Image (cartoon, rainbow, N blue to C red):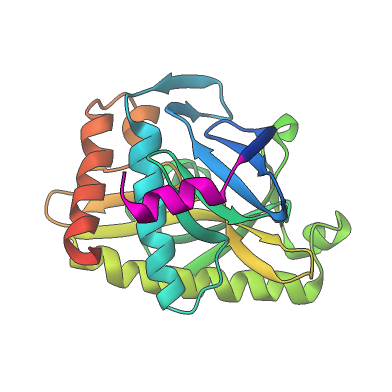
Amino acid sequence: MSQSTKDSSEKWVVSELIYEGKAKKIFSLQGHDDIVLVEFKDSLTAFNALKKGEFENKGKVNREITSLLFGYLTKGHVATHWIEDFGALSVIAKKLKIIPLEVVVRNVLAGSTAKKLGLAEGTPLKKPLVEFYYKDDALADPFLSDDQALMMNAATTEELQLLKTEALKINSLLISLFAKINLDLIDFKVEFGKDSFGKIFLADEITPDCCRLWDKTTSEKMDKDRFRRDLGLIKESYEEVLNRLKKVLI
């Protein structure tokens, strides 16, 4: 064990599980009220967890992808909850109160949105489309307009504008990065949260679980649609995304 790894492991002592979701567990840390440990799981879910699966080392792959992307976004002046990596499966992160909105940015129409609008999958948008979805599994995370988000007290007018601004900034940075590794960023979902002072940070993860990524040359899907649509090669696609990112970010 290296000295830096030893120092890190001695600094963070896990206390108790405080939350478990479909893809991650969150643990409190002894002596740290404002910091948590986030552990990535091997599980795969789709269609509001109606379809379930997993693959070996998925948690490790997604943790590495998230760490690389959050580090990249931090350099691009996006405030994130990521502090440092902890082992193969976990990160140390700021403890946040999650804003109950999934923020989705679409550059190209795909999936259920293309079907809903009666347009062909792969139809490019003239400008990125930002949408809000209410975080509630029991309601299947319904779409919310800005006025509906305000009615639900999910965020203030100022916060909604900040979420849109940050999401579009993240989109611009990721489009540029993924272009370098021959991937098109079709769409993605992000979440945000507030620290104890009310400051808003990018939270959760950015991985092929929550992005649509298509190979620029072959149009091959390199994301969770391979699981949703039973396309196979799920593990291989996630690992390929990670390997491509490592070539430009490490």
Q: Is residue 9 magenta?
A: yes
- Residue at image location 48% in from the left, 46% down from the top: 9
Q: Position of residue 213 (x, y in %)?
A: 31, 51
Query: Looking at the magenta stretch, what is its main secondary structure?
Result: helix
Q: Position of residue 68 (x, y in %)?
A: 35, 59
Quadrant housing the C terminus: bottom left
In this view of the protein, which residue sits in the foreground, 37 or 113? 37
Quadrant of the rendered image containing residue 230: top left
Q: Position of residue 198 (x, y in %)?
A: 78, 69
Residue 186 visible in rendering: no
The answer to whether residue 159 is above or below residue 99 is below
The answer to whether residue 76 is above or below residue 112 is below
Q: Is residue 166 magenta?
A: no
- Residue at image location 29% in from the left, 72% down from the top: 176
Q: Position of residue 55 (x, y in %)?
A: 34, 24
Left or right placement of residue 218 versus residue 228 in this view: left
Residue 246 visible in rendering: yes
Image: magenta residue range: 1-13
Q: How many marks?
A: 0
Quadrant housing the N terminus: top left
Left or right placement of residue 76 versus residue 138 in this view: left
